[in-house]
Image (cartoon, rainbow, N blue to C red):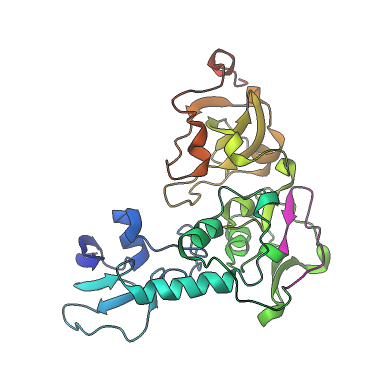
Amino acid sequence: MGMIKVTIDGIEIEVEEGTTILNAARQVGGKIVPPAMCYYSSLKGSGGKCRTCLVRVAAGSTKDPRPMPKLVASCSTPVMDGMIVENTSNQEVLDARKSIVEMLLINHPLDCPVCDQAGECSLQDLGYEHGLAKTRYEFKRRTFENTDIGEHVKLHMNRCILCYRCVYTADQISEGRCHGVIGRGDHAEISTYLEKSIDNDFSGNVIDVCPVGALTDRTFRFKSRVWFTNPMNISRKCENPKCCGKAVAWMSENNILRITARKDENNEVKEFICNTCRFEKKEITDWTVEGPRHIERNSVISQNHYELKPKHNFKVLENTAKQ
């Protein structure tokens, strides 16, 4: 495929033909990257649902420089040669994003102080950047009956924004998906048919892909705030051939409080891990510790400065993996 030029917020880049506007912006990085709550590059069919990535195409291409009449979803719109895109530089885009955040927060409870996702929640970041100080919503929020979906994953349906990430993950990563979206319109919700348990080998990955606190780790529930833990890169040779064996241990002293898959700079998991590694291997002797994980300075998790002043006794941690 050939290379084409596209300009995003005044920055001209060269990308492969067929690249979406969102992925083109990600190659540059920084503030020109539109936010994404439903798109996940490793999940086929994701994107086009949350509308937070809307941008304005000021010029369609060199051959047809006319602007597109409406804002477009950057996660599903391919770039054209000579296209000019406006993201943070366009007030119409920022106003639309503010309205979308307001809509997402209509039914989302403000229970961040008790939510295990606090500190690493995409909706928190989005609300901080584009949200309103007060809500205009005066009606009763949606409520749902508590649904037990298994011993490892806790479902908080009142926090769900219906991004479908967990459904695509269960469809494409695990075998025998038993949960999905039931109901329509305002009654739509994530659930299992007849409250069936989610217990396949890779079901825990739905926790990592959820952008809000709708799906959380039962084994980590209320144990600690994420910014009080120290994330460490760990690895082990897993018996499951589909498991990459590379993870992040969120530690307090020498104790592992939870284990998650590793995420990239776009907050996406590229290699998934099995439930054995995630839920059952909670002893540091089960793993090889590679060292502290780098956390971006703009994240609240970095407040402990653990990369500069690690609290761990590495004499205890090194070479402790089981042979």
Considering every residue shown, the one lying at the far front of the view is 134
In this image, 147 relative to 108: left or right?
Answer: right
Considering every residue shown, the one lying at the far top of the view is 315
* Res 258 quadrant in image: top right
Query: Front-most of 242 and 297?
Result: 297
* Residue 245 in view of the camera: no
In magenta stretch: residue 14: no
In this image, 111 relative to 294: left or right?
Answer: right
Who's the residue at 67% across and 50% down the image?
Answer: 113
Name above or below for residue 260 compared with residue 128: above
Query: Front-most of 298 and 212?
Result: 298
Query: Front-most of 313 and 290?
Result: 313
Q: Quadrant of the N terminus?
A: bottom left
Who's the residue at 57% across and 39% down the image?
Answer: 227
* Res 143 quadrant in image: bottom right
Numbered marks: total: 0
* Image x and y of residue 50, in percent: 52, 71
* Image x and y of residue 251, in percent: 61, 31
Q: Quadrant of the C terminus?
A: top right
* Image x and y of residue 152, in percent: 74, 47
Name above or below for residue 7 compared with residue 284: below
Query: Front-most of 272 and 191?
Result: 191
Who's the residue at 78% across and 53% down the image?
Answer: 150
* Image x and y of residue 272, in percent: 55, 47
In this image, 81 relative to 78: left or right?
Answer: left
Name above or below for residue 51 compared with residue 227: below
Who's the residue at 70% across and 50% down the image?
Answer: 114
The magenta-colored residue range is 142-157
Q: Main secondary structure of the magenta part?
A: loop
* Residue 194 in view of the camera: yes
